[in-house]
């Protein structure tokens, strides 16, 4: 029997913080006859991080991979969206405190993902470009286009080369993907659209601390991705870490200096647990320790899922990789357990494989029983991402964009649009 809106307040109140892969899915999968849900997020839309690099490289428009919560949730009974920054939890009073109000809860789910980690170089926050949100991806896109335009009118050869040097720090999937996209720009776009610039003046460098790219994948995938990047004229420096980035100079541990206007930092992530979560429940990487049912250690009625959660099992003694599939699977299981009202099914991660794309016909895929490279991996990568994007319209727009770009290398999205002034609002 369904419960109508009149007795909504009799339902248990489930508050979910974070509308990423984990939180957003949970808000859909929870039994809306048993729970009323408040989904809290600082943004008013759900986003698809694996394609942020395509926004940054002008391959896709933001609307293709971002979905307004209100539109997605409108058909779900008893689900409300609350835009605000969650600040802390009062575990005694069972209240979530946000910058836009206090929300009482019966059950609280933390699905806040991660943010950039600059390790012991906090000054980088102001100096580098990152790819952890749609806004950061748009900021990077504008920076890339700005540098190309400035280089067209820059008379000084050294300044021009600095403007045209893009350094990516971090050789994981995000670093490899954005470096590949920049390499394609150098190889295929520059001569055609920016005749004032000599492609040889543009430099794309990727710096990785360990001895190979794509550490989380097979050695074959690492070798292939390096080969693909080098084919796109990207300079790959493995086994080196960046020590500082000052006055547009990146200094490496071997003393090498790279003069680079734009530094793209993809080298680290960290959790951001809310105040009020006990210190003993927070582990390395500021992840929140949970048991096998995603219940936060030492807290009553509080759960953590997705990137922010640290749950260990036999094959993952240090916790699961911070990837979409873990977030999705934890969210599905938590919904199941909450719906049953009994916690008897523990979490076991089913690894469905890893992929990264470097450019047109250049990708690597480690699937459970199969390793793919080149064109087959690239088509697999496209298929998997198309299926995962929400909404038929977005799938079609993305597919059309990819097909168009595949045949023409023409992206109509290289638009440099920046706000010129911000009106001051009272709440700021
Ligand atoms: C550039 C990039 C590429 C990636 N590529 C891949 C890939 O190819 N394959 C893969 O499997 N994984 C990939 N990942 C990782 C994957 O995106 C994450 O594992 C996944 O998004 C985790 O889901 P989540 O729900 O835990 O967190 P997120 O998806 O990060 O969602 C967290 C949500 O919480 C909100 N939030 C955070 N703090 C607060 C707060 N205090 N108050 C209110 N709201 C808050 C955020 O706005 C966000 O909406 C990539 C990640 C990035 C950044």
Image (spheres, rainbow, N blue to C red):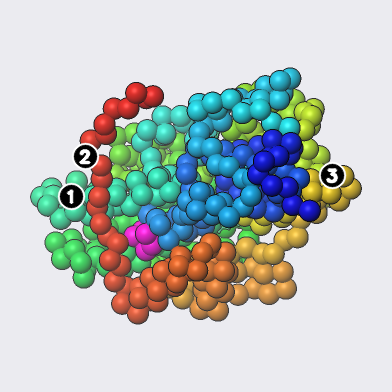
Determine the residue positioned at 36% across, 36% down: 127
Ligand 1 lies under 8 Å from the Cβ of mark 3: no
Q: Specify the segment rendered in magenta.
A: 57-61
Q: Quadrant of residue 299?
A: top right
Can you identify the residue that label 1 sits on? 150
CA separation in Å, label 1 and label 2: 18 Å
The foreground one among 79 and 282 is: 79
Q: Secondary structure at mark 1?
A: helix
Mark with earlier residue (1, 3): 1
Determine the residue positioned at 40% across, 57% down: 63
Where 290 falls versus 278 (above or below)? Answer: below
Looking at the picture, how far across and down is residue 272, in whole percent?
Answer: 59, 33
Determine the residue positioned at 79% across, 45% down: 338
Determine the residue positioned at 45% across, 36% down: 243
Residue 420: which numbered mark, if any? 2
CA separation in Å, label 2 and label 3: 52 Å
Can you identify the residue that label 3 sits on? 341
CA separation in Å, label 1 and label 3: 60 Å
Looking at the picture, how far across and down is residue 292, in whole percent?
Answer: 82, 44
Left or right, residue 177 beside residue 414: right
Q: Secondary structure at mark 2?
A: loop
Look at the numbered discs 2 and 3 and tell me whether their residues touch, using CB distance below 8 Å. no
Can residue 309 be seen here? The reply is no
Looking at the picture, how far across and down is residue 71, in whole percent?
Answer: 50, 53
Q: Secondary structure at mark 3?
A: loop
Q: In the rendered image, which quarter contains the C terminus?
A: top left
Left or right, residue 125 beside residue 201: right
């Amino acid at each position: 029997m369904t419960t109508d809106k009149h007795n909504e307040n009799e339902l248990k109140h489930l508050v979910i913080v974070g509308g990423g892969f984990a939180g957003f899915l949970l808000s859909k999968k929870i039994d809306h006859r048993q729970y009323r849900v408040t989904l809290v997020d600082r943004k008013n839309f759900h986003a698809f991080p694996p394609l942020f690099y395509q926004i940054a490289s002008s391959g896709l428009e933001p609307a293709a991979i971002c979905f307004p919560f209100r539109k997605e949730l409108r058909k779900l009974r008893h689900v409300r969206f609350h835009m605000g920054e969650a600040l802390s939890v009062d575990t005694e009073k069972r209240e979530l405190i946000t910058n836009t109000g206090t929300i009482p809860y019966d059950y609280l789910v933390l699905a806040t993902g991660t943010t950039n980690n600059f390790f012991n170089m906090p000054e980088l926050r102001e100096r580098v470009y990152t790819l952890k949100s749609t806004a950061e991806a748009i900021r990077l896109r504008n920076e890339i286009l700005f540098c190309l335009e400035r280089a067209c009118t820059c008379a000084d050869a050294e300044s021009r080369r600095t403007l045209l040097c893009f350094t990516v720090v971090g050789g994981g999937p995000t670093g490899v993907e954005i470096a590949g996209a920049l390499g394609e720009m150098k190889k295929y776009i520059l001569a055609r659209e920016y005749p004032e610039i000599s492609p040889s003046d543009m430099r794309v460098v990727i710096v990785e601390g360990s001895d190979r790219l794509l550490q989380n994948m097979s050695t074959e995938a690492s070798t292939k991705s390096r080969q693909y990047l080098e084919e796109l004229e990207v300079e790959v420096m493995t086994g080196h870490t960046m020590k500082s980035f000052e006055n547009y100079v990146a200094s490496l541990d071997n003393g090498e200096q790279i003069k680079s206007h734009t530094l793209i930092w993809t080298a680290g992530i960290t959790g951001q647990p809310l105040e009020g979560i006990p210190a003993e429940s927070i582990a390395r990487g500021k992840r929140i320790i949970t048991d096998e049912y995603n219940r936060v250690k030492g807290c009553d009625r509080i759960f953590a899922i997705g990137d922010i959660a640290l749950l260990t099992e036999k094959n993952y003694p240090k916790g699961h990789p911070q990837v979409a599939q873990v977030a999705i699977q934890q969210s599905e299981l938590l919904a199941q357990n909450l719906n049953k009202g009994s916690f008897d099914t523990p979490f076991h991660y089913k690894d469905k494989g890893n992929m990264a794309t470097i450019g047109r016909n250049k990708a690597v895929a480690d699937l459970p029983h199969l390793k793919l490279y080149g064109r087959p991996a690239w088509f697999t990568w496209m298929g998997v991402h198309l299926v995962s994007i929400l909404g038929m319209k977005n799938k079609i727009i993305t597919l059309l964009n990819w097909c168009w770009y595949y045949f023409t290398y023409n992206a109509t999205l290289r638009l440099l649009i920046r706000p010129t002034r911000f009106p001051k609002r009272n709440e700021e």
